[in-house]
Amino acid sequence: MPLPAPAITSLQNPHVKRLVRLRSRRDRDREGVILIEGARELARAAATGLELQTLYICPALYSPEAQEVAPTLPGPRLELSREAFEKVSGRENPDGLIAVASRPERPLPDPGPDTLLLVLHSLEKPGNLGAILRTADAVGVGGVLVLGGTDLYSPGVIRASQGSVFTVPVTALPETEAQAYLAKHAFTRVACTPDAPRDYWDAPLTGRVALVLGAEHAGLPPEWRTSDLPVRIPMHGEADSLNVATAAALVLYEALRQRRSALG
Amino acid sequence: MPLPAPAITSLQNPHVKRLVRLRSRRDRDREGVILIEGARELARAAATGLELQTLYICPALYSPEAQEVAPTLPGPRLELSREAFEKVSGRENPDGLIAVASRPERPLPDPGPDTLLLVLHSLEKPGNLGAILRTADAVGVGGVLVLGGTDLYSPGVIRASQGSVFTVPVTALPETEAQAYLAKHAFTRVACTPDAPRDYWDAPLTGRVALVLGAEHAGLPPEWRTSDLPVRIPMHGEADSLNVATAAALVLYEALRQRRSALG
């Protein structure tokens, strides 16, 4: 058995400097890679067959979950000292695992007669997109289309989705491409908007349906708002609007409820 | 018209030192007060008649919303310099309004025949409790019972709820009191738990119903899990569990849907 390579300790080491650089979207885009940190997130990503270019480990920082996951992860690995790992980590309590991976290529799904899609327009907060992907995973959607330049693989989205960004079929694409795809496959576009004439539970959500949600404050632009079947989420009280992740969960689960009842 | 008092500039001023101290729960509990920061949160709190003991303002930091809200807030006010305000603020971008207020007293609601309650057991994250209160406000619940020592009026909850913690009838109380109250008024206890035999949309959620949810990881303790009507939220995919705020939104809105349908 060869001796393991010594751990990287210098904060000036090129690996350390690259990892720090890759925390900026521009640098990730330029290299065509993503950063994945955390045991759960890496386990989910690896389970989909995603190639990890390099896995950086720091056993001194391992959480119990990282201890378990680390030996199962594929690809070359390098050890960092505690200080070096803390330098490259984006977390307050790093668990000792971070990797550079190639950017997943996700083609648009080839829809079946009952494919349920979610279309997200210009979401701003990584936490919201991540929470929505977790729900989309739980519901088993056919695909998620992300419009408006959102960084699908930002560390914030990866983390908030708990890795669901790798298991859900999700694609970031230009708006015109999304519209062409939905038209070509004759999806019924169901837009959530406060001024819609009917409650979401009164709309037929079976069949080939694309649920469309917009940013929390700006909402949807007119060309999406005036969709085939606009729906609203009824609201009492003084809250201005539900959180967009809450709104997405409500319409996704209503679609699931109707599909289960239809099978019923 | 008297001249306005000069702004407090010294970081050693007793008001400044007290405000910093009140960021700890222990100190808020000892004084029986809460801290409310932000224009929207203060507007909501003031609208419920809550007494603001002292409002601290920093016009140099006003957001457009704070500019509008500040003149409408009741009670004595003191001006802080920018530096002093930034010292006492718990936010990255303070909007120039923070107040010390008395802790709201919320009696348990006197239930009607269709009162819908939400019972939250040992939620850990202020962000989740805040999001749930926003949804509870949107649904118009009759009350929210918070068990297990959660700090109902922590700055994190106030902020994440966008002030809904003041407009929703919410009470923190010991577990035994909550159980006695639910039994006395013959609430049907509907616990959300992954091993329940039926999906939440198949459970009758009209009438006097208390929806019970537990902490995201620990779930509910046995005495709550084995409730009158345990329900589960169906899940595909690899996500371990839905976020508790998402789960709460789903069961709250299903209860609302059923109540609306029952009205015809």
Image (cartoon, coloured by chain):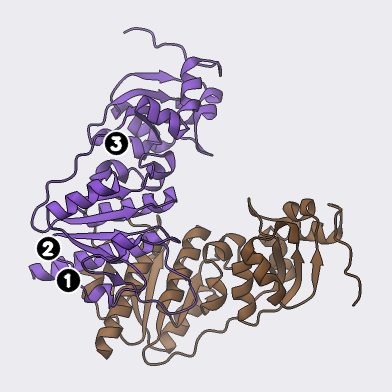
Chain colours: A brown, B purple
Residue ID at (91%, 75%): A2
Label at residue A34? none
Callout 2 and callout 3 share a chain: yes
Labels 3 and 1: the sequence-earlier one: 3
Residue type beneath disc 2: Gly
Residue ID at (45%, 61%): B217
User: How many angstroms separate mark 2 from mark 3 (CA)?
Assistant: 30 Å
Residue type beneath disc 3: Ala
Label at residue B45? 3
The secondary element bearing badge 2 is classed as loop
Image position, residue B53 (x, y; %): 32, 22
Q: In the rendered image, which quarter contains the N terminus of chain B?
A: top left
Rendered image quadrant of residue B39 = top left
Residue ID at (18%, 67%): B205
Residue ID at (88%, 69%): A4
**Residue under label 2:** B207
Of badges 2 and 3, nearer the viewer stands 2
Q: How many marks?
A: 3
User: How many angstroms separate mark 2 from mark 1 (CA)?
Assistant: 9 Å
Q: Nearer the viewer, residue A57 or B16?
A: A57
The secondary element bearing badge 3 is classed as helix
- Circles 2 and 1, Cβ within 8 Å, touching? The answer is yes
Note whether residue A228 is visible.
no
Residue B7 against residue A250 in the figure, above or below:
above
Q: Nearer the viewer, residue A23 or A81?
A: A81
Residue at mark 3: chain:
B
Q: In the rendered image, which quarter contains the C terminus of chain B?
A: bottom left
User: How many angstroms separate mark 3 from mark 1 (CA)?
Assistant: 35 Å
Label at residue B204? 1
The secondary element bearing badge 1 is classed as loop
Image position, residue A186 (x, y; %): 38, 88
